[in-house]
Amino acid sequence: MTNRQILQAMSGLMAGMFVAILAGTVVANALPTIIADLEASQSSYTWVVTAELLAMTATVPLWGKLSDLFDKKLLLQLSLGMFVVGSLLAGFSHDVELLILSRVVQGIGAGGLTALAQVVMAAIIPPRRLGKYAGIFGAVFAIGTVAGPLVGGVLVDTSWLGWRWCFFIGVPFALPAIALLQRTLRLPAVARREVKIDFLGAFLIVAGVCALLIWVTLAGDEFDWASWQTAALTGAGVLLLAAAVFVEARTAEPVIPLGIFRNRTVTLTTVASLLVGVAMFGGTVFLSQYFQVSLGKSPTVAGLMSLPMILGLLVSSTVAGQVISKTGVWKRYLVAGAVIMTVGLGLLSTIDADTSFTLLSAYMAVLGIGVGMLMQNLVLAAQNDVPASELGAATSVLSFFRSMGGTIGTSVLGAILANQVASEMTKGLDAAGIPAGGDGGGENSVPDMSTLPEPMRQIVEQAYGVATADLFLIATPCALLALLTVVSIKEKPLKTTSGMERLAEEAATATETDKTVVGG
């Protein structure tokens, strides 16, 4: 494909990917308003977030496997269609039960978009040229991740729009994306092997992952980390995943081919993606809360304050991608990205309620630059080193573990944040001689700063500032482990043929081998 054809095909892919990312982030600043309007409980607050994230994370490997067996364009359009249905259901919801169900549908569609967009890119673009296009992909990912809360804040603050448009806003992107894919994405027909879907393995994987993700999401909030609920959920999750490994090792068409983990590059990039998810998502998801509570900003301003991170990620992912495509050298950018990400998290661990926006912007820009150089190029390294027939599985595995890392990081660090805020509030109240009247809120119970008297407001601001800094300090070792993992990856020359071309070559080689065997 020519550069023009690739860019035309990517227009639909990028629109779809932007929709998927936006779905998970746009409700961040709108949730308190949504829950209050629907007169829902505090536990419902958690489930509106968790339902979409669980469905997306658990179904990514399934979409990746299906892409190795069925038409990729049709699957992309199907996932976009599911997203549209889920978005409309969510926007028209008049009770929280329907909202949670619609978020599950949204999550399944978003899981398909997350996995399939990268699979299709690898299918039509050779790894040697993929870097510059992956930079665009990384930029879209960054904009959707960090700009989502800004868009949500603006929609909630605009009286004639309201929170329902947090769900409707994705539809105008999804519908043109379906049409663009139909018109611009041309994937050559490839002879398919006999299709056998491992339904048992798929069920065991989804059930096991959901059990563990429900545990890390609710532990420390709905029940204690050391409780019978923890024992039940972790025990069930481990047993289900152990059964899944047993089934996957013996089936003809496993959802996740265990053999791909014999590939050193796939294993190391998978571990690095998990750690990046923990460090990146686990650390930054609470920045919006820090801006609003500790710095006293509105939802819209809090979204704007994230722009330095967006710009850092946008510039570094684009520039690194262009240079990689030009030179064919990629490992140094992975290592540099991991180093810079670690430094950025370390710098953010020094913030408090009095940190100037200039200094905070510099720290966020450093983190964004590091993530931009690292995240998408991990996928490039893995895609370059697997057979074309396993591109879908390898790509979805990386996306799956990155999402899982983000879920674990967000849940665990959220619990730590709640405990740290309570501890800092107690210290501040004792120092001020004020009787303690509560824990000051947690990750899902943020105090209304406008109603607090000045002495109490200063204590709350300081508590959230110190607690947020502690989260970045805890996330820093994860980034350091990611750096050590990336250093261990062996650099290999980038291939000059696309996934579809390699698949045709592999099929031709297999045919010749069969003829030789028969003739012999």
Image (cartoon, rainbow, N blue to C red):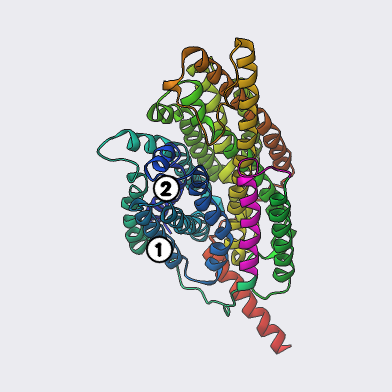
Q: Going 58% across and 21% down the picture, which residue do you hit?
A: 463
* Residue at numbered disc 1: 77
Instruction: Name the kind of residue labelled 2 in the image.
Output: Phe
Q: Earlier in the sequence, mark 2 or mark 1?
A: 2
In the picture, the disc for residue 257 is none
- Work out whether 274 lies above or below 373: below
Type of secondary structure dominating the magenta stretch:
helix
Q: Position of residue 342 (x, y in %)?
A: 65, 31
Q: Residue at x 61, y 31 (%)?
A: 417
As helix, strand or loop, the secondary structure at mark 2 comes to helix
Please provide percent x and percent y for residue 1: 43, 59
In the figure, is residue 357 to the left or right of 268? left
Outermost residue on the left side: it is 160
The quadrant holding residue 437 is top right
Q: Is residue 243 left or right of residue 52?
A: right
The range drawn in magenta is: 201-226
Is residue 342 on the magenta stretch?
A: no
Q: Position of residue 333 (x, y in %)?
A: 61, 38
Name which quarter of the figure residue 377 lies in: top right
Q: Amino acid at mark 1?
A: Gln
Give the quadrant of the C terminus.
Answer: bottom right
Residue 205 in the magenta stretch? The answer is yes
Q: Which residue is mark 2?
A: 18
